[in-house]
Amino acid sequence: MKGQVKETPAWLLYAVLGTLLLAAFLGSVSVGSLKFSWISALRHPSSEMSFVFWDIRVPRAVLGLLVGATLGLAGAAMQGFLRNPLAEPGILGVTGGAALGAVTVFYTGLVTLFPMVLPAGGILGAFISVILLYLFAGTLASVQTLILAGVAINVIAFAGTSLMLNLVRDPYAVMDIVFWQMGSLADRSFQHVLLILPFVMAGWALLLWDGRALDALSLGEETASSLGISLKALRARIILGTALCVGASISVCGSIGFVGLIVPHLLRPYVGYRAGKLLWASALGGAILLLGSDIAVRIIPSLVELKLGVVTSLVGAPFFLFLLFQMRKKIL
Amino acid sequence: MKQWAQSVTADARRTGSGVFHCSWCVARWFLFGLVSTCFFVFLTVESVLASEKVEISVPEEKSRDSFSGKNSSPRRIVSINLCTDELLLRLVEPGRVAALTRFSDNADVSTVWETAQGIKKTELDIESILACSPDLLLGGRFNNREALHFFQYTDIPVIIFGVPKSFEDIYRDIRTLAEAVGEPEKGETIIRQMQTGLAELKAEAGESRKKILLSGATQDDGKGNKRRAVFFQSGGFVPGSETFENAIMEAAGLENLAATLGIKDYGSLSLEKLIEMKPDILIFASDQKKQPTVRGEVLAHPAIRKSLSHVKTVTLPSATLSCGSPASVEAVRILVKETAL
């Protein structure tokens, strides 16, 4: 800030993030109530260890990687596009909308007819909330307009989710609110991974495509237009990409908040405050953070396994407050 | 670009000297402190008074005397718990029942749904119960505490049943209710039927266990020859010792693995632990298999199918599990039949 912005060399940044990601992934497949090393699970196929490894731990870690990267990437893209440091899928109600969409198709039994409906429902919910957000707040809204719009969407989505679960015939379905509000990667399987993989990949492609456009946009809309960036196309790609990857992710693991807020903020100094480069770094960072939180969930002793969203919120909410505190001059 | 980034993290400059920079602010904080102190004092006094009040009044005893003292036979009985619905309909003729819960004629959860047809169903709030003008109110410990609490202060006798943890508890509940409605003989008959049923099933389970041991289908590891079962429920919950499900499993001659692990009441068992324990029998409840819920997805996890493919699975109808009643013997019967070789 006072001096000039120092930018970490790209190779160093990606090497560090890559190493951390690898460590987090290996940590995630090694932690659980059954004690064995992943090497011995690979050596003894069709033992009970390898079943646990391949059918419980690996899908869990892969899902953590996909969802974490999605949330980090979506957070960075939204912050870049809205040029607003508090933009994040969770705070702005995109994950809430996705959860509502997923709950709607899950508990009406549509999902038993055709499994692809589940991510589709989540994507539709996320899409609707992004559109609503855009209608409420527009691209250049002030911080408080955006946050208020997010609060409103979140409340609507939560009420809708609770209503859906209350209407279900099963009296215990209401307990599932915890899952949809707090998120969890526990006991997911490769079915879930395969279900969301195509959508997540498509969403990533749409968002990662926008690196240069976001760089240009950070100079202002006129400058970006004069540099040949079509703002309409950019907007469409961001909205569609966010809805696709966030919606699909949330539909199998519930709302997980604050990952998209923390990660871009922590990494921004290391990419020289460049919105485009931040996309890749945030994707890696998000995956690391979520895998790390998922390890913490399993290590912290408790009667029932903690929910993943609890851990990310415990870390993220104070961070959010801290950001607000720093910006209070601008907001008030 | 640089500018924007700076505005994000740059420190905002402070003006004034914190919250006490004017006299009005000081007064405001003082007032706030005063009000909150008063609030906490009030709260403390209130809670002390409330705890004393509870110690003085014993309305439960009062109502208990009122029905057992004079050997009356109530004619407008209202039940606001599915389990008391079931016991009641087995003990008295439907004409004496004023109202039941709306679950009582649902064949998925109730075992007396045929008898319950045509009897009035009540909502579970105080007003709806009053509208039935009951002369005996039956409820469970864990639902509608407010309504039951209210009626404990009225002249209407109230009986509250706990959740049974063994067949002895079920017999005790049946006796209590039979006495209250003036049908003690009928109650004893039902209990005798249950006891003989359980004794037969025990013998049957012993027979099949011997057969299994002879055929060598299960490894005799010296820890007794009972087969090890887990009642795996939504969200990885398992009933441990001192639960009703445990009583059913033991009556069917099975060892409850969760109880062996030291789980008391209900606990959670991770999927990994379940696979590590290698149970001989996996028990599910039918409604949890049928209804799609997120918590129920773990029951169909591919890891169970792959690594526990040899394990016998039994799905018990939920209606036989929802309450401790004569239908519980039916659950034991299904378990014994299904686990026999």
Image (spheres, helix red, strand yellow):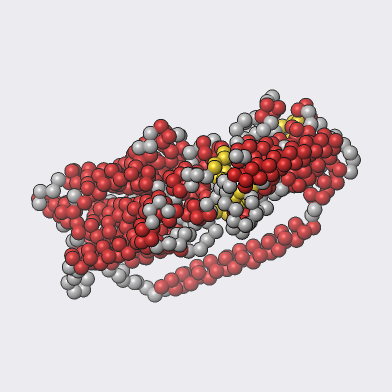
**Horizontal side of residue B18 vs B39, given as left or right:** left
Vertical comparison of B337 with B229: above or below: above
Q: Is residue A125 visible?
A: no
Vertical comparison of A21 with A120: above or below: below
Q: Farthest residue toward the front?
A: B214
**Horizontal side of residue B178 vs B81, given as left or right:** right
Q: Quadrant of residue A79?
A: bottom left
Nearest to the observer: residue A26 or residue B127:
A26
Count the numbered circles shown. Answer: 0
Q: Residue at x 89, y 43 (%)?
A: B69
- Estimate the x, y position of residue A218 in percent, counting from the top left: 18, 56
Q: Residue at x 84, y 40 (%)?
A: B179
- Estimate the x, y position of residue A191 in percent, counting from the top left: 37, 43
Vertical comparison of B229 with B134: above or below: below
Vertical comparison of A271 with B82: above or below: below
- Estimate the x, y position of residue A261 in percent, counting from the top left: 33, 58
- Estimate the x, y position of residue A150 in percent, counting from the top left: 36, 49
Nearest to the observer: residue A236 or residue B13:
A236
Q: Residue at x 38, y 37 (%)?
A: A115
Q: Residue at x 50, y 67 (%)?
A: B28
Quadrant the C terminus of chain B occupies: top right
Quadrant the N terminus of chain B occupies: bottom left
Q: Is residue A276 visible?
A: yes
Q: Farthest residue toward the right?
A: B70
Nearest to the observer: residue B310 or residue B297:
B310
